Image (cartoon, helix red, strand yellow):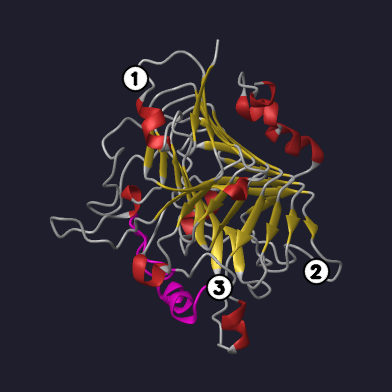
């Protein structure tokens, strides 16, 4: 039998999400639903107990917001930088967790001065994110586990630095996710269905830094920067000269031999402000990255090549980038008109291999 906890300003309820989570035993085996009243909750949270659902009780996901503002360039007490993997607003470190009707936000601001900033760090099996908004800039959503090895010392400092790398299945349904540089990244098997992925315009300075970083050594701590997670139409009105590349939606690090990586099914890739052809669908954080699009709508901001190789030609023989039945957001745009030679165009039979039931296996989140 499930248990329901309430978070609100009612004196008989929990006053914070963290206090409600603390009441759940570490060895929990009973499904627990935490119903969260509309409002903004400035909390940095960890869910490390299974069978928990966080459910926003507002009219939409925008009415119940979990927000925090840690960022990678922040200095710790010992003088070191916080780094990417300690910046999360919400960290899921267990199995069988569901988020519903929530906004998870990293509100740290312009990553030209703040660096990477994770909103949701999801590391576990059977994680369902349903009708949520994930807001950030660079590295908005990390789908753990971490890759086996870091590329530079200290690149993985954080809660899972020394933990075993265990692949988990994650399901994102009817979600909105925004960002600019690698804003969905990691090693998990993750299925995105009916989601909207919005690429944000960056400042002139931060976009220029990307032109340098994409030709330099690939670092785990990252070197690209980005702008505020709000409309930057005021920047366009000032007539800045924008560099050609504004961002990358994904940066998968699928381990060698893992059957599935990222699958986007019936999703929309949009941008209000990014120029035409200025955003890649993805680039490989590790050499065996897998990202597949099935029947997705592509806006004109998507680069005609589709994917980028991060200037590592060896990955042309190792990555699995593919799409089936992509279609344009407008009639005057022809998506992937200059498809990179390492990006596959699937037929109907091949696309069937990436059906949700096959990807998620014996887990059927829609039946929960």
- The tag on residue 26 is 1
Disc 2 to disc 3, C-alpha distance: 18 Å
Region rendered in magenta: 202-225
- In this view, 5 is above or below 68: above
Farthest-out residue, top: 1
Tell me residue 107's x, y (percent): 44, 59
The residue to which callout 2 is attached is: 333
Closer-to-camera residue (83/47):
47
Check disc 3: other Cα within 10 Å, few if <14, some if 14-19, many if 20+: many
Farthest-out residue, right: 331
Q: Secondary structure at mark 2?
A: loop
208 in the magenta segment: yes
Check disc 2: other Cα within 10 Å, few if <14, some if 14-19, many if 20+: some
- Seen at 69% across and 21% down, the residue is 367
Disc 3 to disc 1, C-alpha distance: 46 Å
- In this view, 156 is above or below 113: above
- Seen at 34% across and 48% down, the residue is 85
Q: Quadrant location of the C terminus?
A: top right
Q: Secondary structure at mark 1?
A: loop
Q: Is residue 118 left or right of residue 78?
A: right
């Amino acid at each position: 039998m499930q248990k329901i906890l309430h978070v609100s300003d009612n004196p008989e309820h929990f006053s914070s999400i963290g206090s409600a989570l603390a009441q759940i035993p570490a060895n929990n085996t009973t499904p627990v639903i935490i119903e969260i009243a509309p409002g903004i909750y400035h909390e940095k949270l960890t869910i490390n107990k299974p069978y928990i659902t966080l459910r926003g009780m507002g009219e939409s996901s925008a009415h119940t917001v979990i927000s925090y503002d840690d960022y990678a360039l922040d200095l710790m007490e010992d003088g070191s930088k916080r780094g990417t993997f300690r910046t999360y607003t919400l960290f899921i470190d267990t199995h069988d967790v569901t988020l519903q009707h929530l906004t998870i936000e990293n509100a740290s601001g312009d990553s030209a001065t703040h660096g990477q900033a994770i909103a949701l760090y999801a590391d576990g099996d059977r994680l369902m994110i349903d009708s949520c908004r994930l807001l950030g800039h660079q590295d908005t959503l990390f789908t753990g586990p971490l890759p086996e090895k870091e590329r530079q010392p200290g690149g993985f400092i954080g809660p899972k630095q020394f933990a075993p790398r265990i692949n988990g299945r994650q399901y994102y349904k009817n979600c909105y996710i925004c960002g600019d540089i690698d804003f969905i990244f990691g090693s998990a098997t993750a299925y995105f269905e009916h989601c909207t992925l919005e690429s944000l315009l960056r400042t002139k300075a931060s976009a220029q830094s990307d032109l340098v970083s994409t030709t330099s050594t690939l670092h785990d701590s990252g070197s690209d920067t980005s702008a505020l997670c709000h409309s930057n139409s005021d920047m366009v009105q000032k007539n800045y000269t924008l560099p050609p590349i504004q961002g990358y939606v994904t940066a998968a690090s699928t381990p060698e031999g893992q059957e599935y990586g990222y699958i986007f099914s019936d999703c929309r890739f949009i941008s209000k402000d990014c120029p035409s052809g200025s955003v890649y669908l993805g680039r490989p954080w590790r050499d065996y990255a897998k990202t597949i699009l099935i029947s997705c709508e592509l806006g004109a901001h998507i680069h005609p090549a589709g994917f980028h190789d991060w200037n590592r030609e060896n990955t042309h023989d190792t990555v699995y980038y593919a799409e089936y039945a992509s279609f344009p957001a407008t009639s005057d745009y022809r998506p992937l008109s200059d498809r990179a030679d390492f990006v596959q165009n699937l037929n109907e039979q091949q696309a069937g291999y990436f059906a949700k039931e096959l990807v998620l296996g014996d887990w059927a989140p829609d039946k929960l």
